[in-house]
Amino acid sequence: MKIQTSRFGEIEVDESRIIKTEEGLLGFEDIKEYILLSEDNTDFYWIQAVSNPDVALACMSPYCVYDNYVAHIDEVTEKKLGLIDDDDALLLCVVVIPSDIKKTTINLRAPIIINNKNRKAVQLILENNDYSIRHLVFEQREAG
Amino acid sequence: MLILSRKKEEQIVIGNDVVITVLDVDGDKVKIGIDAPMNVKVLRRELVEDVKAVNTESMGVSVSLFSELKAQMEKK
């Protein structure tokens, strides 16, 4: 099927790759279907809304900043995702890049969790308050 | 908005299975206990609002800045 995007124009996507979120993403509760767009590097994705060309969130793997990042997925979320094996979960965190790129932040507190097996997704706010919603990407890398 | 006055240790029931208890009041701080089923999400409002704000701000990221970020992260 073809979808319209403001950033990449019209693109052809395989329907089987559509990601479904029952609850939508926070702030975009009405948009339930997304598609992951990446180039060669699979740590970086755009989560593009299928039905709204303008809605696309820039996301990055949390493991780019924290090798030992841990998202505790509670039972209710596991059920929602139909997640049996945690290895099937793809974790992506939303990034915000200001004009000064060194101040880029990643939301480690509320990862988007995608079950690779069935393409169901949830944005989960973790209980763990060690993780910040606006974690400075470069600070961590330089410190580590 | 429904407005109720409650004293310490008094409760409010929401629906069939959510119970809110005022545990303590100290100046402008109220300690609240919430009993809710596992599938009812209970979160501090400002946390939810901040996640929404970040999601919305991320929409403003341009393709060129995102590529630049990728390049800078790969360099390291």
Image (cartoon, rainbow, N blue to C red):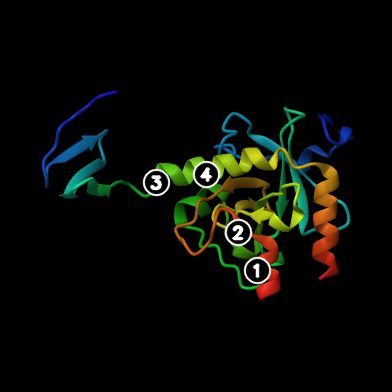
- Chain of the residue under the numbered disc 1 shown in the image: A
Task: Name the spot of residue A2 as percent of width and height, x first.
Answer: 85, 30
> Is residue A40 among the parts visible in the rendering?
yes
SS for tag 3?
A: loop
- Residue B25 placement, left or right of A17: left
Is the residue under label 1 in contact with that under label 2 (CB below 8 Å)? yes
Instruction: Quickly name the residue at label 3.
Output: B44
Point out the tag, 2 or 1, that comes first from the N-terminus: 2
- The circle on residue A135 is 2
Chain designation of label 2: A
Q: Which of the 4 quarters of the picture holds residue B62?
A: top right
For marks 4 and 3, give the CA distance: 10 Å
Residue at coordinates 22% horizontally, 47% vertically from top-left?
A: B30
In the rendered image, residues at marks 2 and 3 fall on the same chain? no
- In the shown orientation, is residue A7 left or right of residue A102? right
Q: Give the residue type that dot 3 points to.
A: Arg
In the image, residue A17 lies at what x, y percent? 77, 43
